[in-house]
Image (tube, rainbow, N blue to C red):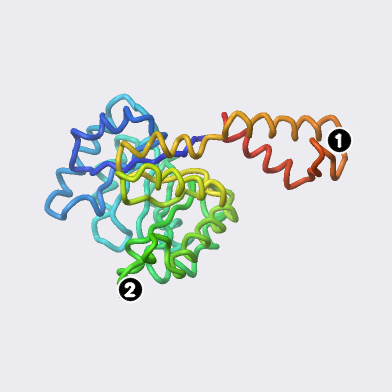
């Protein structure tokens, strides 16, 4: 099982940053051919990404290609697929149909990670990702393109929290990922200097059911990894829950340290232990 606690964006036209990014401890890099690269620089970025992919693999490497309707994705794939990226990040994804369209362009075991909330139509398709292809590695979301697409002036309240439409986008991504049986990946925290705010944001993400998060700056990686790694106390408690049920096969509810535990607690304990591997 691939570990995706932290996924660090790297502009595809900045090969000087790629090796440095790989040394941050990020579980994966997202080599970006879309928003981070101006149209005039995309051809050179494709070459730079392909060259980095051809080197010894320092960690899991995704490539964010341009959208399916951009007229650019086939050139992106032609440049990078011979070097066998571990996965493709698909922007502007609109449900299972988009997933199937990209799946048809790939061979081998290359994963797909859709960014699933960037268009209005995408919001109505977040329950359609399951059962389309085993390539699906997770679902993630973003709060930048969607407000631009609908003419909104901002996605956040004055206190920095998401406005109601974007809280909905986040929630539907979370449930859509779990309905499809894949990882739910939290979106970026844009203020890369505010590491305390990042830690709180990532902790809320893990609390709510996300298993990882995207990053835009190397300084964010260690904070994100810590937030999405179970503590020793959590691991010990999870082991105790699993051991209790193994010692009492067939039991529906049991008592542990004076508190009732049942099937949902056992499921949660097994998830903690899987995350700790």
Label 2 crowding class (10 Å Cα cut-off): few <14, some 14-19, many 20+?
few
Q: Nearer the viewer, residue 43 or 107?
A: 43
Label 1 crowding class (10 Å Cα cut-off): few <14, some 14-19, many 20+?
few
Q: Position of residue 32 (x, y in %)?
A: 27, 46
Residue extending farthest bottom: 151
Q: Position of residue 75 (x, y in %)?
A: 23, 50
Q: Position of residue 254 (x, y in %)?
A: 85, 40
Q: Secondary structure at mark 2?
A: loop
Residue extending farthest left: 40
Q: Which mark is residue 152?
A: 2
Left or right of 237: which side holds 192? left
Q: Position of residue 124 (x, y in %)?
A: 49, 70
> Which image quarter holds the C terminus?
top right
Q: Which mark is residue 264?
A: none
> Which image quarter holds the N terminus?
top right
Query: Up-down: is 200 above or below 2?
Result: below
Distance Cα–Cα, label 1 vs label 2: 54 Å
Query: Up-down: is 188 above or below 148?
Result: above
Which residue is label 1 attached to? 249
The quarter of the picture where residue 261 lies is top right
């Amino acid at each position: 099982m691939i570990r995706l606690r932290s996924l660090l964006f790297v502009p595809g036209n900045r090969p000087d940053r790629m090796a440095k990014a790989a040394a941050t401890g990020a579980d994966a890099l997202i080599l970006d051919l879309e928003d981070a690269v101006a149209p005039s620089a995309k051809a050179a970025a494709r070459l730079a990404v392909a060259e980095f992919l051809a080197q010894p693999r320092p960690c899991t490497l995704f490539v964010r290609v341009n959208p399916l309707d951009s007229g650019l994705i086939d050139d992106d794939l032609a440049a990078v697929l011979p070097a066998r990226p571990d996965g493709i990040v698909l922007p502007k994804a609109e449900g299972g149909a988009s997933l199937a369209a990209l799946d048809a362009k790939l061979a081998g075991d290359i994963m797909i990670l859709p960014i699933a909330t960037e268009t209005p139509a995408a919001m109505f398709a977040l329950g359609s990702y399951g059962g389309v292809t085993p390539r699906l590695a997770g679902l993630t979301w973003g709060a930048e393109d969607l407000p631009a697409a609908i003419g909104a002036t901002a996605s956040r309240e004055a206190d920095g929290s998401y406005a109601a439409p974007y809280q909905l986008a986040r929630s539907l991504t979370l449930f859509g990922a779990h309905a499809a049986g894949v990882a739910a990946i939290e979106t970026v925290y844009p203020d890369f200097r505010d590491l305390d705010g990042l830690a709180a944001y990532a902790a809320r993400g893990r609390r709510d059911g996300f298993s990882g998060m995207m990053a835009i700056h190397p300084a964010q990686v260690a904070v994100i990894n810590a937030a999405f790694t179970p503590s020793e106390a959590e691991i010990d408690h999870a082991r105790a829950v699993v051991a209790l049920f193994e010692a009492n096969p067939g039991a529906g509810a049991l008592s542990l340290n004076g508190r009732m535990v049942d099937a949902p607690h056992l499921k949660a304990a097994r998830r903690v232990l899987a995350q700790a591997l």
